[in-house]
Image (cartoon, grey):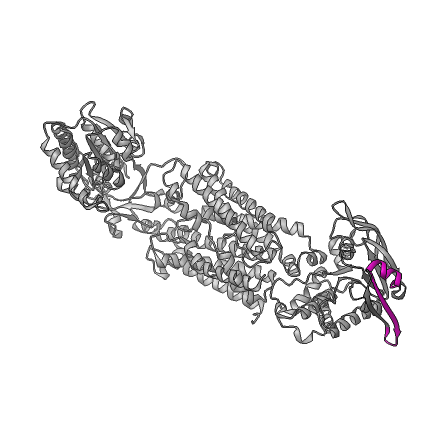
Amino acid sequence: MRARAGIAAATGARHWLGGLLLAPWLACAALAGARDAPPQRVVSLNVCTDQLAMLLAAPGQLVAVSRLARDPHASAMSVEAEGYATTPGGAEDVFRLNPDLVLAGSYTTHHATAMLRRLGVPVAEFTPTRDFDGIRADILRVGALLGREDAAEAILAAFDAELAALRADAPDDPPRAVLYSANSWSSGEATLAGAILRSAGFVNAAAEAGLAYGGTLPLEQLIMLAPDAVITGTRYGGSSRAEAVLDHPALRSFTDTRALLPLSDADWVCGTPYVLRAIARLRAAREALP
Amino acid sequence: MTLLSLENLTVRRGACPVVDEVTLSVGRGAFVGLIGPNGAGKTSLMRAALGLLPHEGRSNLATMLPEVRARHAAWLPQMREIAWPVSVEALVRLGRTPHRRAGGQEADHRAVANALARMGLDGFKDRRATELSGGEQARVLIARALAQETSLLLADEPIAGLDPAHQLGAMEVFAALADEGRTVVAALHDLGQAARFCTRLVMMHQGRVAADGLPAKVLSPGRLAEVFGIRAQMIDTPHGPLFQPLERLT
Amino acid sequence: MTALRFPLLMALLGALVLVLFVLSMAFGPAGLTPGQSAAALLGGEAGAAETLVMREIRLPRASLAVLVGATLGLSGAALQGYLRNPLAEPGLIGVSGSAALGAVLALQTGLAAAFALALPLMALGGAVLAVLVLLLLAGPGGGAFTLILAGIAISALAGALVSLVLNLSPNPFAATEMVFWMMGSLADRSFLHVWLAAPFVALGGVMLLALGRGLDALTLGEDAAAALGIGLARLRLVLVLGVAAGVGAATAVAGAIGFVGLVVPHLLRPLVGAQPSRLLWASMLGGAAMVLAADIAVRLIAPERDLKLGVLTAIVGAPLFLHLIWRTRREGL
C-alpha cells in the first residue's frame, strides 16, 4: 500500500519540479522509520480520510478535518466532525496549523499538497476506494500512519465480521438493480457503490448496458433494462437540472411497478466501515421487495 | 366638399412653434403645392394634419380612426425607406393595407396595376425594390401611395431626386389626379414645377401661412423677396407659366 | 431570386418538420428498431418499457423541439421585421439570457416548486425587461450596431447573474449548470415541460403571427406605416409580450438556444419574397425544423454526452452572423 501512495503522489506531482518527486518517498520512509514516535498534529483534507482519522486517532492527535466532514450529504460522521476544527484546505491554512502529518485525497488538493511538501510537511495521499479490500488497506494504512495499529486491527476485525454476517444467506435468484443519480450517472460493478450493491444481494443491471465503472446511463436505457429496483440518492436542497431526471415522469411511472429506493447517501461515499450501514439498509430493502 | 380642414393647427418643438396657428381648407379636385424655405414647417404641418405629430388645434384627418383615415388620405414621407428586398409589386400592394381586401383581390390587383402603369413601372413589377436606383425607388413609392386610392394624397417632396422626365411625369400624374376629382397636397421645392402644375399654392414662412391662392398671385416679387430671399421672373407661355429664380437678395 | 409560391413553400416546410419529427422519434440509446418504435408509440401496452420510452421520453423531446424551434424562429422573424434589422435575434440580443435569469431565479428561490407556472412567468418577466431595454436603447432607427452593443451588454449581465444565482444555490449540481442555461438542451425533458411551455408558446405565437400586416407596412418606415393605419404603439406592445411569452417559456424549459432566430429568417427570406408577414409563418416552421435537426445531430454526434443544442446552432449561426455584419457594414445600412 505504500507503493500505491507513492504512485499516486508521483502522479500528483508530475507537473511540479522533477526534484519534488523524491519528497513523498522520503516522507514515507521517514514515517515508517519513526513508528515509535507517532505524529502529534494530524490534519486531514479529504472527507474520506477525515472519517478514517476520526475513527482511529488518539484524543488530541487529529487537529483539523476538511469542511466537507461536517456536510451530512457527504460525510457519515458529520456529527462527530463538529468536535473537530475544520480547515478550508489551502496550503497556507494548513501550514499555519503546524501539522506533522497531512492526510489528503489524490485528486482535488494537488496544489495544496505539492506546496506543503515543498514546505517540508509530510503528506500521505489516498486514492478513492473501489472495493472492500481497499477499505481494509486504508484502515490499516491510516492506523500505521497514526501509530494506532491496534485500533485499526480491532476496527478491521469488527468490519470483517459484520460484513460476513450481512453477506450471509444471499438469495439464489438475486433481484436486478440499477444505481441512478443526478445527470443520469450510474455506477457499475467496479465501484464502491457496486460493491455495496453486490454485498446487499443485488445484481447490478448496469453491467448489461456495458457499464463497468461509473458513467451516464440514458433514461431510455435504464427503462429498457427493466431492473427490479432503481436505487437513487438522497436529494440536495435548492434545484438543479442534474437532479431533474430523477423526477422524470417516465422514471416515476416505470417505478410504479418496481422499487424506487432513495437510499444512497453519505454512507456510500467513502471507503469506511460505514458502508456496512448502507449494505444493511439496502439488504432490508431487498428483503421487503415483493 | 372639403377633404382637408385645419383650424389653428399648432405644432411645438419645445416651446417654439414650428407650425403656428395654421388654418387651411382644401376641397376636391385640387393640386396644392406647399412651398416655403427649409424649416418653414411644411413637413410638420402635413404630419400633424395626419395626426402623426402631437399638435394643438384641429385637423379633420387627425380626428379619424387611423384605419379610416388611411382610406381617406395617403401619405408619402420624404424619407424613402424600403427595408426589405421585396418585389416592386409587393411594395406597391402595401398601399392596399387599409382596405383589408374590402373590394376583393380583384380590386387590389386593379389598383396596383393602375398605380404601376401611371408611374411607368410596368416592366419593374418583379424587380427587387431595393435594387432599383434612387429615382426608381421614389417612383415605386409614389405608386404605392397611388395604390391606396384615397381621395387625398399628402406628399413630402415627391419629385426630389427624379430626373427631368420623371419629374414631369410625376407632376402630370398629380395634376391628372386633381382633374379626376382627387386632391393632392405636395410639399415642393421646385417653384417652377409648382407654378406650372399646381392649381393652388400655400406659401409657408416660419410656421405660418404667408400666402394662399393661385400660383401667379402667391409668387409675387414681394413675397419671394420676404420669404425666400430671391428675385425671380415669371412669364406666361403656351405651356403655362414659366418661373425662373434669378438671384439671391442679400 | 425565385419567390417560391407561398403555399408550396409552406407545404414543403411542413413536410420537412414532419420528417424530422419522425426521425427524432426514431433516435435514441434504447436501440429500438423503427418497427418497434412505431408499434410502441401507436399501440404499445401502457407501462411496457418500449411504450414508456416512446411516449414519455421521445415524444415530449420531439414535441418540445418543435415548440422551442417554432417560437425562436418566429420571434427572430418578428423582431427583425419590427426593427428592420436582419441581425435581431432573441439569443444574441440578450432576450434568451434574461429569460434564463428569470427561470433560474424561479427555480432557485423555490418559487417554481411552490407554483409551477412561476417558472415560465418569471422567464417571461426576464424577457420582457430585456426587450424593453433593447427597444429603448436601440429601437427602430437605432441602427444595427447599437442593437448588437446593447445586446452584448444585456447578454453579459444576464449571464453573470445566472452564474451568480447558480453559485449561491444550496444544490452543488446547480453551480455546474451554467452551460445548460446558456447553451440549451432537450435531454430528458418530459411532458411536464411541454405542458408548462405550450400555453405560453401558443399565446406568443398567436400574438406574433397577428403582426404580419403591421410588419409588412413597416417595410416603408414608421411614418408610412402609421399613415397606413397601423397602430405602432399597440404593435410594439404585442411584439414585446409575444416575444417574451414565447422565448421566455422556451428558455425556461430548454435553456437559451441562440442563432435559430437569425439563421432561419435569413435562409427563408429570399424564398418568401422578403415579405415580413410571410416570413413569420415560414420561420415558425423553419425554426421547428432547425431545432429538430440540431437535436437529432447532438444525439448522433455524441450519444450519452448531452451535447448542448446551442453548440450546434452557434457553429452554423455564428459565421452567418459575422457575414451579415460584414454585409451590413459594406452596405452602410
Q: Quadrant of residue A147?
A: top left
The question of residue B228 being in magenta is answered with yes
Residue B227: x %, y % from top left: 83, 58
Residue at the image position 41 percent from the left and 61 percent from the top: C23
| Residue occupying the far front of the picture | B250
Q: Residue furthest right?
A: B217
**Residue numbers of the magenta segment:** B218-240
Is residue C249 visible to us here?
no
Q: Is residue B1 above or below residue B174?
A: above
Q: Quadrant of residue B232?
A: bottom right
Q: Nearer the viewer, residue C270 or B187?
A: B187
Classify the position of the C terminus of chain B by image quarter. bottom right
Quadrant containing the N terminus of chain B in the rendered view:
bottom right
Please indicate, yes or no, whether residue C231 appears anywhere in the rendered image.
yes
Residue occupying the far top of the picture? A59
Residue at 31% x, 31% y: name it.
Answer: A72
